[in-house]
Image (tube, rainbow, N blue to C red):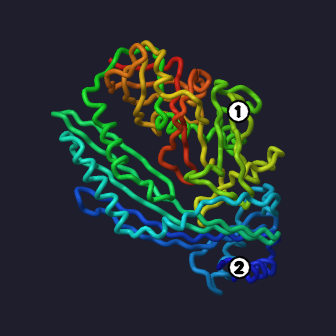
């Protein structure tokens, strides 16, 4: 590991400069991304990134610097820049370099077979997705977005307290969005796949599910406004969880930017709701054995049967509250400072099929699409007002498609009003260092505005 070649030299120079505790964070990775549109390759990118970040305590303040070139001159600049960074910090707060406690769980995050897949095979996958999608139905107008990407990286942390950790991982994803047209009407559908086993990337599944979703929305109309029983499809439930996930961050709680402040040990959701942060999830998009500070990660039931059990902590916020870190101190890359974010964050699935959730609803709505998640939702208050589409539920059956409706409410009140949890856990597109998942959820009452 390249880090071992330099750490003693860096720590020695850091000590001479006046640093006490010091940490090195090294990351090296390669990523591939390609897009196809109408038989042409519109994007083809292979990139490598490698860099080293240094953190150290200088006169009680944390200095930080990073470099993408590691040589003798870079080491001198790294220490000098970190010292200058520490000297300009005006806030006085306790800072930490982690000494290590429990060794991290060894996770199988790397599949060597994925790295053997030739780039041409990945392009052939995209071309086949497009071909199949266009052949399914004459009403397929275009495959608007057809993307494949994969990445592999190695992350290592070493510090002057003796901590030395390394983790290797890789993953792949595919995303397709299809537009169908019938007369003047156009609708879209999408499908997302992820994992690190390329053999499970079936172009027929990706294409057919996207096309089927788009076709199912043709002929949609609005509906009467009112309070309705609603079933949120898993992808939409996951997207809502993502929007409001910042409320579980201890940093936001401590800054009075969380609706959940002061509610530890209190009931915040239906007893059917358990929300888990699981960095050890098998095939999880962002599974990891240790966090960006070297703290061993662990599965946390953040909400357990409706009760708020913990916030998500890094070392700094954990010290403020006098609790252990939950292993959620994260760095988006070696260039980033330490923040807080979930790993694989999801609502635990129940035992009911989607059909079971729907069968007792006489007059309701099955929501399969939400728009305006960032502009139509207040992450702190929990309030949301979102354009939506989906299907009517009549006498326990999904019937006609609906569009041009808006659903409105408060996310945390909605969690308390959950009366059914599906078994169909699914994750949405990842966001930064986090992935969000949910099963389909049955809500007793949501305001739906239509015609």
Q: Which residue is mark 1?
A: 304
Residue 238: mark: none
Coordinates of residue 35 in the picture (x, y in percent) = 33, 59
Q: Secondary structure at mark 2?
A: helix
User: How far apart in space, not on screen, are marks 2 and 1 (Cα)?
Assistant: 42 Å
The foreground one among 364 and 321 is 364
Does the residue at mark 2 contact the one at mark 1 (Cβ under 8 Å)? no
> What's the residue at 55%, 43% (across, down)?
436
Q: Residue at x 53, y 18 (%)?
A: 444
Numbered disc 1: secondary structure = strand
Q: Report whether residue 282 is seen.
A: yes
Residue 56 in the image: state x and y as whole percent. 75, 69
How dense is the environment of label 1, judged by Cα within 10 Å: few (below 14), some, or many (20 and up)?
many
Label located before the other in sequence (2 or 1): 2
Q: Residue 403, located in which quarter of the rendered image?
A: top left
Asked whether, in this view, residue 344 is left or right of residue 223, the answer is: right
Q: In the displayed structure, does residue 368 sit left or right of residue 26?
A: left
Q: Nearest to the eye among marks 2 and 1: give it.
A: 1
| Residue closest to the far left | 183
Q: Position of residue 40 (x, y in %)?
A: 24, 62
Classify 358 as above or below 320.
above
Q: Which residue is mark 2?
A: 4
Q: Nearer the viewer, residue 333 or 41?
A: 41
Q: Quadrant of the C terminus?
A: top left
* Residue 65 shows in the view: no
- Badge 2: how crowded within 10 Å, few (<14), some, or many (20+)? few
């Amino acid at each position: 590991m390249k880090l071992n070649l330099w750490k003693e030299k860096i720590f020695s120079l850091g000590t001479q400069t006046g640093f006490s505790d010091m940490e090195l964070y090294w990351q090296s990775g390669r990523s591939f991304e390609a897009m196809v549109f109408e038989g042409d390759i519109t994007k083809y990118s292979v990139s490598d990134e490698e860099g080293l970040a240094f953190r150290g305590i200088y006169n009680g303040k944390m200095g930080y610097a990073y470099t993408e070139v590691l040589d003798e001159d870079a080491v001198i600049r790294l220490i000098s820049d970190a010292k200058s960074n520490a000297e300009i910090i005006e806030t006085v707060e306790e800072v930490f370099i982690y000494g290590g406690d429990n060794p991290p769980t060894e996770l199988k995050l790397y599949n060597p077979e994925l790295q053997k897949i030739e780039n041409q095979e990945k392009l052939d996958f995209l071309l086949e997705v497009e071909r199949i999608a266009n052949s399914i139905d004459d009403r397929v107008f275009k495959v608007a977005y057809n993307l494949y990407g994969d990445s592999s990286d190695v992350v290592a942390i070493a510090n002057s307290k003796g901590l030395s950790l390394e983790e290797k991982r890789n993953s792949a994803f595919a995303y397709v969005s299809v537009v169908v047209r019938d007369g003047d009407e156009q609708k879209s559908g999408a499908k997302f796949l992820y994992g690190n086993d390329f053999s499970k990337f079936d172009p027929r599944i990706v294409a057919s599910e996207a096309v089927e979703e788009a076709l199912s929305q043709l002929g949609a109309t609005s509906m009467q406004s009112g309070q309705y029983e609603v079933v949120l499809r898993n992808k939409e439930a996951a997207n809502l969880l993502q929007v409001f996930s910042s409320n579980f961050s201890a940093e936001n709680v401590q800054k009075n930017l969380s609706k959940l402040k002061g509610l530890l040990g209190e009931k915040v959701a239906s007893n059917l709701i358990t929300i888990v942060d699981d960095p050890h999830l098998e095939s999880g998009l962002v599974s990891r054995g240790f966090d960006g500070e070297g703290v061993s990660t662990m599965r946390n039931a953040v909400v357990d049967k409706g009760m708020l059990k913990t916030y998500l902590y890094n070392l700094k916020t954990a010290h403020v509250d006098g609790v252990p870190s939950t292993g959620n101190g994260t760095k988006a890359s070696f260039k980033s400072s330490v923040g807080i974010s979930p790993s694989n964050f999801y609502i635990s699935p129940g035992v009911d099929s989607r059909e079971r959730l729907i069968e007792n609803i006489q007059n309701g709505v099955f929501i399969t699409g939400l728009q305006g998640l960032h502009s139509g939702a207040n992450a702190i208050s929990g309030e949301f007002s979102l354009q939506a589409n989906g299907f009517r539920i009549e006498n326990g059956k999904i019937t006609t498609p609906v569009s041009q409706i808006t659903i409105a409410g408060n996310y945390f009140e909605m969690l308390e009003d959950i009366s059914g949890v599906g078994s169909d856990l699914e994750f949405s597109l990842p966001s930064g260092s986090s992935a969000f998942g949910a099963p389909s959820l049955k809500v007793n009452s949501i305001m739906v505005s239509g015609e």
